[in-house]
Image (cartoon, grey):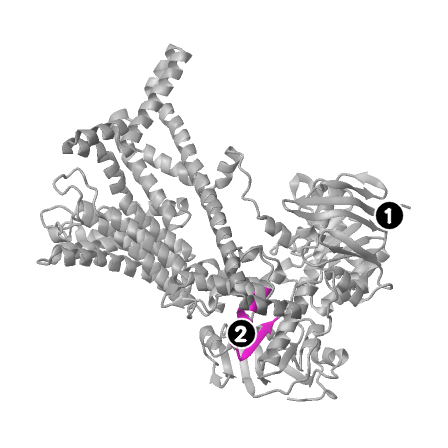
Amino acid sequence: MNKKRSEDASIREDTSSVATNSETALRDKVRKTRGVVWRSLLVPLLATVTAFAIGGLVIIATDESVYEAFQDGIGRGIVQVFIVIGRAYGTFFTGAFGNPAQIVEALFSGNAAQIRRAVYPITETLRISTPYIFAGLAVALGFQGGLFNIGAEGQYFVGGLVCVFAGYSITGLPQIIHLPLALLAGVAGGALWGAIPGYLKGKTGAHEVITTIMMNYIAYRLAEFMLDVGGPMARGDGRPVSPEIQLSAYLPQFFPNRVDLRVNAGIFLALGVAWVVWWLLYRTTVGYEIRTVGKNPDAARYAGISVPRVMVITMALSGALAGLSAATDILGVLHFMPNSFFSGYGFDAIALALLGNSHPAGVVLASLLFGAIGAGARNMQGMAHVPIDITSILQGLIIVFIAAPAIIRALYRMREPEEDEELALARG
Amino acid sequence: MPPVLELKGITKRFPGVLANDHIDLRLEEGHVLSLLGENGAGKSTLMNILYGLYSQDEGDIYIRGENVAINTPNDAIRQGIGMVHQHFMLVPVLTVTENVMLGMESMKRAGFLDRETSANRIREISDRYGLEVDPDAVVEDLPVGIQQRVEIIKLLYRNADILILDEPTAVLTPQEVEGLFDVIHTLVALGKSVIFISHKLKEVLEISDRIVVLRRGRVVGSTTPVESDERDLATMMVGRDVILSVAKMPREPEAVVLNVRSLFVRGDQAKMAVNGISFEVRGGEILGVAGVQGNGQTELVEALTGLRAVEGGRIMIAGEDTTHASPRTITEVGTAHIPEDRQRDGLVLDYPVEDNMILNTYYLPPQAKGMVMQEAVIAERAENLVAEYDVRTPSISTPTGNLSGGNQQKVIVARELSRPVRLLIASQPTRGLDVGSIEYIHSQLVRKRDEGVAVFVISAELDEVMSLSDRIMVMFEGKIMGTVSAVGATKEELGLLMAGVAPETATMTS
């Protein structure tokens, strides 16, 4: 032991050896990180592929033309199967990403209208992805803090109400002030709605799953009360919707004069916020506290972290993100708030957080996938007459496979995630 | 007559590791064979092969001279081999009978469980081997020592002749260990054979007929208690000379650092667990707490470190009143805490080593500037600590849960001792660790004492308390039975105090 200590003294003096040490560690880290990234992408990827395969079977099984063709003969039937699948997923792909040939052609032609038409599907995918990213981040952040926020839906509604109020009631401000103000209003509404269950959990131990669900119902009724005909925030023209927001609160459009191209600056805001969430979680003391409470609340307490305080912060941040989801939808796309009972974002967000492994980058990828599925399925319905419900089936299947990775591993004969060699060594 | 069990040339490889390297082993009928080795020596791997959980890459197993293949635990049970795992495999809410029956239920007609027959058989076994287990008791109400006996009954119920006990004393109090040894004596007297796995030298010397020492997957020695002593075994086990007693020079204590006055703390059952105790610890001395577990030591430590509310009394650390202070405040006045349950309280097992090294200082400069964590600083600090405190880890980004218990504890020790502290509270600092790690952690505690830190050690191991401490305080039912100088203290004297017998002759020093 004493020998060891004297060695260490020399190590500390010999800074170069420390440097090499940390360099090796860094290289080691990079190599490991790559492995981890690949492994964490593989299951979601295979889950998606498998979901599409099974979704294909559903499409075939529900297509009458396939049955008719099989009555004419097995060969005809098989051909028809491929035609149906090809048409369905072909229209799905062009609906989500556009037709590559058309895009290239349009770009070469230089005709603005033609380009707009060609890139429309991608803009729709991005437009649908935007609120997904915020909502997914909301739930993912909760997961990181060990909290299951089922209340993103309610936080979306309250965030939306506050945001739209700031959007239509305040007049005479320049966009540079009004827009951030309206966004912040959405953040504040969501944060407040999230912080309440966080406080209840921290102070009394009331389980957040129960309280957030109940807060959802309160939010629905609140929105109903506010926006229903005759309600304090209703438009007053007999429709259960809020007034239009001021132009100064609009999120900038890429194609301001085209109503159909609805993609807006919200997507950049979403990507930026995803980065901020990553930075907050992994590079700041607040993130360290959130993750420590999430992984081991006893150790957090031991470390002097106030667990109730961190729970309130986590839920408030989570709610703030859900509120932003509503804000971008309202300020970027709808420009008013309708009184609809479900946006669905809050619940899809749970799926997104799971699919993205609660990591901001994963959530962004998952949201883009869900955006593509949404846009693709709409086109598939229009062009190939496949019911839009296929969206739910695909999303549902993906989540089942993510939640039960053993199915995917068995299907593709993957090995169990191997315990590191060092583990075998350490445990003997 | 062939031995009841013989292993020949057992070899098991894991990716990158040779866990068992041509191991030969003989167990005679009616004997206790001890397998001694540090964590990671290959004891558990070998026993898991014998129990059918792993299969060997090479080698043969002979039962009473017959070569047998053991591929599943069922094969092992059929061959009369039974194993009591370190962590019990019992259903807490079921009765003893139900737990024992589980997996081989006896039935009445129409598929009803025949508890009566099983219970009678358990009573019979219990009487025969002197186990004193009530078949109708619910397992979760039983103390750990009795739960272990239920596990033994499970094996006997299944007619096991060869009983493997994996680190059976790790979870027991000294008294329960004595009880277990009585049971083992009865078992072998009635013809059973026992494999006893441990890394505790004293126990192995006390109970064994033969001792086999493993190191890095190999048999490095086979001996008997008569032919060897603790020093021999320790040297064989670690592969070098080890210092078993704690080397420390006499030292004059300095000013009082921890001052506790008539402290009352409630336990989990609302009863007072700490009942109006007063004591002080001075800089440069080690005050050890001896006592059977569950006499208020845990609650006392939690109260001192701010993890449990204080009902009455006062705690002063380094001149500050910390009676109702938060854990953070207590840390900041200069308290280091090595917690009793290192995996629950002391570490985030999913975190890499480097993140655990900053668990309670993550927010302080230079680890953080404002709210931004300084990754490079944190990594460099971790590299230095890993080197300085001899933490055996592949890298600082390895998840801490992947390290052995000894190395996990070293992570905590490195973190707690590397910052300037006035008071060090170490609760069960060496529980479950191997000889090498124990030696190291003891030397670190003494080093801190020599630097003038007030050290407060709580341990269930009386030997540890006696060899580490300058003064020994004995706790019984939340009260201090007596405080004696470690010099000249005897086990008998302390044992009486631990049992709650008031001191007549004990020298009171505080």
Tag 1 residue: B3
Q: Nearer the viewer, residue B423 or A326?
A: B423
Residue B354 lies, with reference to residue A70, above or below; the image says: below
Q: Is residue A302 above or below residue A190?
A: below
In the picture, the quarter occupied by the C terminus of chain B is: bottom right
Q: Is residue B101 magenta?
A: no
Q: Circle 2 sits in a helix, a strand or a loop, which is it?
A: strand
- How many circles with numbers are drawn on the protein? 2
Classify residue B291 by image quadrant. Answer: bottom right
Seen in the image, is B64 located left or right of residue A122?
A: right
**Position of residue A243 in the picture relative to residue A327 (left or right):** left
- Tell me residue B5's x, y (percent): 82, 47
Question: Looking at the picture, how far across and down is residue B253, in whole percent?
Answer: 61, 87
Magenta part of the protein: which range? B410-427
Q: Alpha-carbon neighbours of circle 1 within 10 Å: few (<14), some, or many (≥20)? A: few
Depicted B374 relative to depicted A105: above or below:
below
